[in-house]
Image (cartoon, rainbow, N blue to C red):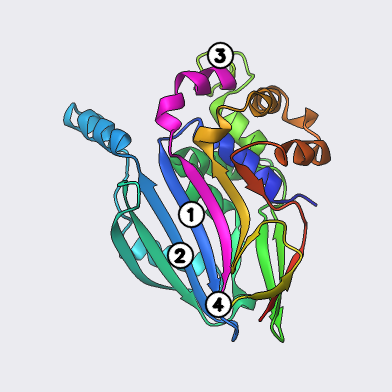
Amino acid sequence: MKTIFHLSLALLFALCLTSCFQGGVQIQLKKDGSGEIHRSTYVSPQMTAMAAMAEEQGGESQGFGTPSAEELQADAAEMGEGVRFVRVDEGKNAEGWDGYVAVYAFDDINQVKISSEGLSESFGGDAAADAIEQAKAKAAAEGTEAEEGMIGFAYADGVLTVNPEMGESPVDSLKEQAGLGEKGGEGEDPFGGMKPSQMMGMMGMMFQGMRMDLSLKIDGGISKTDATHVDGDTITIMNADVGTLLTDQTFLQFIDQAAEDPDSVDEDQAMELIKTVKGLKVEDKKEFTVTFQ
């Protein structure tokens, strides 16, 4: 069984291929099993200005605007039966970045399914979406089906069980989409022949402020839980402060190894490493429970 670790790794590769942004998904759960999902996306002023300049010069639109109501309603349908789009709040975050928060409601957390594909597209932008589509196309051509993971929820009598099952690692599809480690392949190498860590170092200033966050907020407070990262009524399933990550040499060496040979990365060993890296929190349990107060 693969865990949220694989999603984190894939998204970090996607960050190398996309713009500077902040993405977050928070599930807010009430004791009766209903609640809301808040999905936020914000783009840095520097990237917004660069995109506007490129468009003025005839370049392709980067698609940083707020999705349409139809697109957000379609996203709701993919998050489980009964999940519905409520509203979108546009504006700036605390750092002054432009973006939006899309709010979805649900009546029964047992029906909610947060897919690895949906999270990848939320956090990884167009690069992750393209990688997913390429993986699907390849699987279809081979007569198979690309495996997708789900974060599942089981709730009864005030106790929530969370299973962050992420399916097979999407690292290989991201690597294939980017052409990493291949010579003469069809994909373009976004690192220009350099190691990912070298490119990240050169683009370090662009990544300052970039964050990804996946969390669970319990209305009324938590009585007990065996989740790893807990702060008051909020449980962090994954949080990455990319600007901080890019200063950690051990982490950069790990990224280079994973880019060169994803199969060489042992999940258990990598999780031990991740626990010591600054700027990254990842839930290391394959299942955890939360009891309401």
| Residue at point 55%, 17% (across, down) | 198
Which residue is disc 3 drawn over?
194
What segment carries the magenta color? Answer: 197-219
Mark 2 closeness class: few <14, some 14–19, many ≥20 residues within 10 Å:
some
- Tag 1 secondary structure: strand
Location of mark 2 (residue)? 38
Left or right: where 283 falls relative to 26: right
Q: Amino acid at mark 1?
A: Gly
Q: Alpha carbon of mark 2 to alpha carbon of mark 3: how far? A: 37 Å
The answer to the question of whether label 4 and label 2 lie on touching residues, with beta carbons closer than 8 A, is no
**SS for dot 2:** strand
Q: Which residue is mark 4?
A: 219
Percent across and percent down for residue 231 are: 61, 61
Q: Earlier in the sequence, mark 4 or mark 2?
A: 2
Q: Nearer the viewer, mark 1 or mark 4?
A: 4
Give the mark toward the camera: 4 or 2: 4
Alpha carbons under labels 1 and 4: distance apart = 18 Å
Residue 197 left/right relative to 145 = left
Q: Which residue is mark 1?
A: 24
For label 3, the crowd category at 10 Å Cα-Cα, with few meaning under 14, some 14 to 19 and many 20 or more, is few
- SS for tag 3? loop
